[in-house]
Amino acid sequence: MTTVTVWNEYRHERNDEEAREVYPEGIHATIADFLEDEGFETRTATLDEPEHGLTEEVLDDTDVLTWWGHEAHDEVEDEIVERVHERVLSGMGLLVLHSGHFSKIFKRLMGTTCDLKWRNEGEKERLWLVEPGHPIAEGVPESIEVPEAEMYGERFDVPAPDTLVFNSWFEGGEVFRSGCCYRRGSGRVFYFRPGHETYPIYKQPEIQKVVANAVSWATPISNSDTSFGNVPKPPEDG
Ligand code: ZN
């Protein structure tokens, strides 16, 4: 069974009333709950725990890590970023959600600024499924409407994704690559845009479906570990 660690910065929901009303137990609790309903084994981890809840033991038992952060990216210790980075290269799946675009781990994996345009006025967003044959698209409608969202607009400064699964349109006319697949080493990385802390976006069934599909897609296969270095020449045939 796939084991998911749902990581959350968990600051807005404690310090900001608007966010607390939407996610009283924290964004991580909502995400872990619906992933558990989808049949995944889940645990949560947050910034203010020792080692941000991401000890070697926890990561040993993590197939896929989901990442939500916003106002405290800088407080994530470089040592933990390094640890997560190594895990991704050796096969752990990583889902980077919404404002996680500016997390240290995502910038490290992308190698670019990961910057974008934004505006938070509760505009309507429509996600278009542009790769309907992709595993992340399983059971997902051709388009998903998010009634109120923070706008993210291009240019989104990331490398061209290996596969682009969703494109977003916003009421103001901007567009955004909102579902991007990457491979880094043996690991699979999915960036998924929706999910601002003051809108109940992770309570939408279609959004939950995408996140669950992405967890399945990012789950490592059993032999993703590989070996490197000097090797003896194979013996010649008889
Ligand atoms: Zn946001």
Image (cartoon, grey):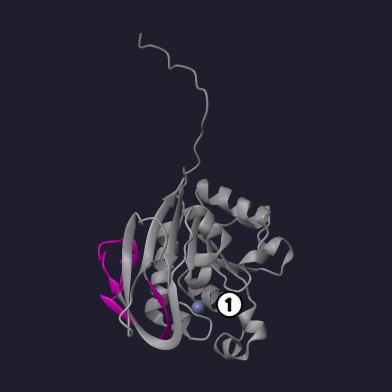
Q: Position of residue 179 (x, y in %)?
A: 37, 66
> Image quarter for residue 208?
bottom left
**Three-letter code, disc 1:** Ala
| 171 to 53, vertically: above or below | below
> Image quarter for residue 174?
bottom left
Indicate left or right for 26 with 213 as reference.
right
| 63 to 68, vertically: above or below | above
Q: Which residues are magenta?
A: 128-153
Q: Position of residue 110 (x, y in %)?
A: 47, 55
Assign a secondary structure to mark 1: helix
Provide the residue designation for mark 1.
Answer: 29
Q: Position of residue 212 (x, y in %)?
A: 43, 69
The crowding category of the residue bearing disc 1, from other C-alpha atoms within 10 Å (few below 14, some 14 to 19, many at least 20), is some
Q: Which residue in the rendered view is the most extreme toward the right? A: 50
Does 135 appear in magenta?
yes
Q: Position of residue 207 (x, y in %)?
A: 40, 76
Task: From the viewer's side, name the closer residue of 128 and 121.
Answer: 121
